Image: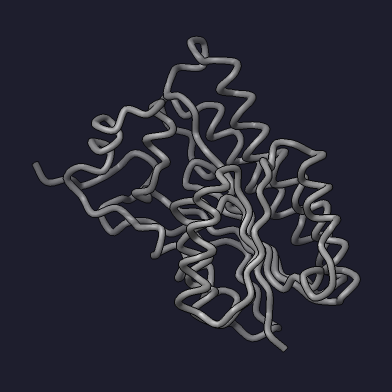
Amino acid sequence: MQKTVLITGATSGIGKATAKKFAQNKYNIIITGRRRERLEKLKEDIKEKYRVDILLLNFDVRDKQQVQQSLSGLQGSWRRIDVLVNNAGLAAGLNTIQEGSLDDWEQMIDTNVSGLLYVSHVIMPLMVEQGHGHIINIGSIAGKQVYPKGNVYCATKHAVDALTKAMRIDMLPHGIRVTQISPGAVETEFSEVRLKGDKEAAANVYKGFQPLKGEDIAEVIHYVTTLPQHVNVNDMLVMPTAQANANTFTKKE
């Protein structure tokens, strides 16, 4: 039977690359995100290249009602979700905590923590009912180490780390695998969003070294799902070769 993966935040970066990677491997795909036009384009691209079914769900993970209405309304074979990739997330602003924006804080907490919980709360019972599944939460090096001006973003990713560990315990009796993938520097829209659309400043973040790409993390996400059923990767920290920890890099001038 063909398997199904649900990916949040599939409009760009890691989520988009993950959708394509699973489509290459003959999964049926559920893509979700806020930007409908991008989802439509991704759906067209996947349909043209791969013989898989794809379902588009346009909602914001921060909105509890949208999440519940969209996911509780899944019908037929779409309710049989083998892999959930909780990818939707962002950083907003780069300030000391005393100078931080309350709006930025709420956006990060609502997306990175509440959004992950809202989606998981609907999908986990379906996995329990079917007796199998794999939940993959996209964390970050920021969930392992706090760095200057990272404060609230780091706190949200530390929460993802804790929630993943809690899910692992709670899903254990049901045979459902739970994994956290924690990337270091990945060149996506991440820095551009964080720096409020300043493309030049965002490009400078990755200057002088080779960062990870969305496709690199997609490879890792898919890999952990290919392991034998008795094998669970609890946590994986994935860094560019040029990055040792949250703020130690080797860069060429």
Q: Residue furthest right?
A: 129
Q: What residue occupies the far top of the structure in this picture?
A: 98
Q: Position of residue 151 (x, y in %)?
A: 52, 26
Q: Considering only vertical position in the picture, is 101 above or below 19?
A: above
Q: Residue at x 50, y 50 (%)?
A: 38
Q: How is the image coloured?
A: one colour
Q: Position of residue 33 (x, y in %)?
A: 60, 48
Residue at image point 23% right, 54% down:
210
The count of marks equals 0
The reply, left or right, for residue 18 in relation to residue 213 is: right
**Image side of residue 99 versus residue 110, left or right:** left
Q: Quadrant of the C terminus?
A: top left
Residue that sits furthest to the bottom in the current view: 1
82 vs 139, left or right, is: right
Q: Quadrant of the N terminus?
A: bottom right
Choose between 88 and 250: the one closer to the eye. Answer: 88
Q: Residue at x 48, y 72 (%)?
A: 21
Q: Position of residue 117 (x, y in %)?
A: 75, 46
Identify which residue is drawn at 79% across, 73% down. 80
State the residue in front, 65 or 99. 65
Vertical relation: 14 (above or below) 227: above
Residue 190, quarter of picture: top left
Q: Quadrant of residue 134?
A: bottom right
Where does residue 132 sit, x and y in percent of width and height? 80, 76
